[in-house]
Amino acid sequence: MGAVNAVADLAIEGEIAVLALDSPPVNALSHILREGIFNGIKQAIGNDAVKTIVLICRGRTFVAGADITEFGKPMKSPSFNDVLGLIEGSPKPVIAALHGTALGGGLELALSCHYRVSVPSAKGGLPEVHLGIIPGAGGTQRLPRIVGPRRALEMITSGAHVNAATLHREGLLDEIVAEDELRAGAIAFAAKVIAQKMPLKKIRNLDEKLAEVRGKPAFFAEFRAANARKFRGFLAPEYGIRAIEAAVDLPFEEGLAFEGRLFEELLKSPQSAAQRYAFFAERQAGKIPDIADDTPIIPIAKTGVIGAGTMGGGISMNFANAGIPVTIVEANQEALDRGLGVIRKNYENTAKRGRLKPEDVERRMNLLKGSLDMQDLADCDLVIEAVFEDMDIKKSVFTRLDGIVKQGAILATNTSYLNVNEIAAMTRRPEHVIGLHFFSPANVMRLLEIVRGKATSKSVIATSMKLAKKIGKIAVLVGVCHGFVGNRMLAARQAQANAMLMEGAMPWDIDKVLYDFGMPMGPFAMADLAGLDIGWKKATSSSANIREVLCEMDRRGQKTGAGFYDYDDKRNARPSPVTEKLVNDFLAKAGVTPRKITDEEILERCIHTMINEGAKILEEKIAIRASDIDIVWINGYGWPVYRGGPMFYADTLGLAHVVAKLKEHAPKLGAGFSISPLLEKLAATGQRFQDLQ
Ligand code: 3HC
Ligand code: NAI
């Protein structure tokens, strides 16, 4: 025995055959790997000395799924189901030995085996839903048979990675073996299978758990209703539910065929194309062309945050969650107590929902040290400033930090709009200054815009990118401009939304169009949520705009029970007659006769102007690539991932179409509007933003 092919190796140890797969980086089920498994299993079956077969992977993980790069191409034989069918039908028990992440086709492979063992750190899941598809190698048919339809629904529609202990408890894993001894543990298990003459356990033959819900359509209806909000707009979760219904109602082979049809249909859908694009875009964002992999990383053992307000508190939680101590400096005791109190309450709420152990609340709180003295930041490796959005205050904070914090440390600002170069210039170490722009709520939102100043060193950038990953963020490197990538494009959209109010649309008309497009909320609902008084200073009311007048009326958004909308005590929004009258008064005063604005115009003026701004951002090299802009919008603003981000969406519309529409609307887009030359050029030559990469 020995090499089966370039990625599979078969070793015979007495009565046990060990088929080891090794296809870096993640042992994806590419053609060559499928071939290696198929031929390896066949050889083992054909070897009379062998009584059981162990399937194990080398490298960082067990099979992490189908090879996504092969999607869309005809599948070369052997297919997934050929491989899985051979294993399941093997007359000799096959034992899957899992480590790392057994995902998608990887978990499906394991489910076709007769037994499964794993190390404690392993995880398993069916994350296909994140790629806009469903499991296509029997996952929707086998998983409910072993963990039950309810858990299968949860796992398949959420794509969650489930830890080994849970999988063991739920019956998916037969045994957990010692962490560093997977091979030996799996062989010992195989020996037990032989010694005890354990049967060929085929998941396809299990029926007990399915029978519990058979003939009970209400079971599925309830699941759909309970998750309707979460699944809104997405095809794949609904298809996953249908496939599990088929598992319950149909014989195994028919269910498998039904799954196959749904899988194929989704694979061809625009949603899946967008979600697969987003998967690779996210990984691409981590690659910075001029920064080498071996760029020195600054160790970050101790951090500081200045300001314990909305952002400072959330930012600090990220570090505490990752076990990194944080010193939080505030201007006064009251603000410090309030800030720490909010953090504690956040953790306690999470604990109440069962998502954090009570002792972890204390462990995390113990990592946070409050202070009123900036001197306490002297030995921090990274300090993030999150004080008011005011250049003078930020400048004075950085001047002081420069004199206090040790050399070599990173000094970061969380500014939303301000010029990072100007802030850096206040220090004698601008190469150590960077923008770390978190999104609110900072402990929840996954996006981090990392703002590269003109002097920022490569080492500081590389360290920030790495740290972002450690605290669970998706980082996108951007350049300095007003509002960076996300907020700058948001401003383009907001300008159109405001303008349309002054032409006859009501806030809820505009919000509805964007909500129906798939955004979590429209610009006015978002303003109400954030607070209308952000950056508001009581102005001379003669020149105040609609938003400012609402503030003067003490309608400052959700927190005051009213803003653009009226809110009930559960914060449900209703269109407000007060706002409607206010908007109409503004129109009357300006002598404007309101007109009916179509949904199409609302959408195009909001979205196409954002795309245009995105093109300018690319032209100015504020973003490295169009897909980085998409990652910002998906992860920072809830852009529906099934539409792949604004730049990808523009590509699907066709850039010539986008330009034509912008030209059509141009007279209404405002004096400051101009079409991006890059956008026009791409449109004229029939190119896409994706072609720039
Ligand atoms: N196919 C092809 N390439 C893949 C891949 C896959 N399934 N999974 C990961 N890769 C590539 C990544 O693109 C990346 O490539 P790069 O280095 O050139 O950028 C490399 O492997 C390493 O990936 P990560 O940077 O993501 O590594 P991490 O260690 O952070 O994460 C992981 C590893 C958890 C396995 C993560 O990569 C992941 O979630 N992968 C996708 C898993 C998945 O969705 N599986 C289901 C696929 S669909 C399927 O199986 C259909 C079936 O039902 C028929
Ligand atoms: P905030 O008003 O909630 O908090 C600011 C805190 O800084 C206050 O608690 C204040 O007492 C404290 N502070 C002010 N000067 C200080 C000083 N010299 N020393 C120590 N503490 C001081 O403001 P928020 O919303 O947290 O914003 C902070 C920064 O984050 C701003 O630059 C803002 O633009 C940015 N930001 C805000 C987002 C948001 O949605 N709120 C999103 C992303 C960035």
Image: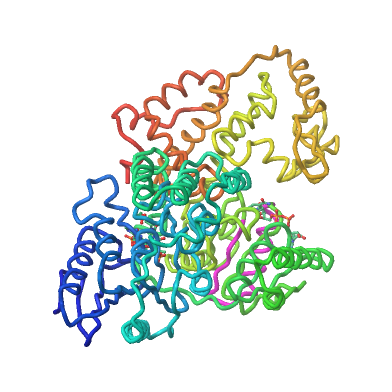
Residue 250: x percent and y percent?
Answer: 42, 48
- Residue 580 appears at what percent x and percent y? 77, 24
Q: Nearer the viewer, residue 595 or 209?
A: 209
Decide: is 451 above or below 146.
above
Residue 13 occupies which quadrant of the picture? Answer: bottom left
* Residue depicted at 24% across the width and 46% down the height: 73
Residue 546 included in the magenta stretch of the image:
no
Image position, residue 137 (x, y; %): 34, 55
Instruction: Please state which of residues 149 and 554 is positioned toward the viewer in this rendering.
Output: 149
x and y percentages locating residue 349 in the rendered image: 73, 63
Q: Is residue 427 left or right of residue 658?
A: right
| Range drawn in magenta | 390-414
Q: Is residue 29 visible?
A: yes
- In the image, what residue occupies the spot 68% across and 24% down? 501
Viewer-side residue, 163 vs 645: 163
Res 19 quadrant in image: bottom left
Left or right relative to 668: residue 594: right
Residue 95 lies in quadrant: bottom left
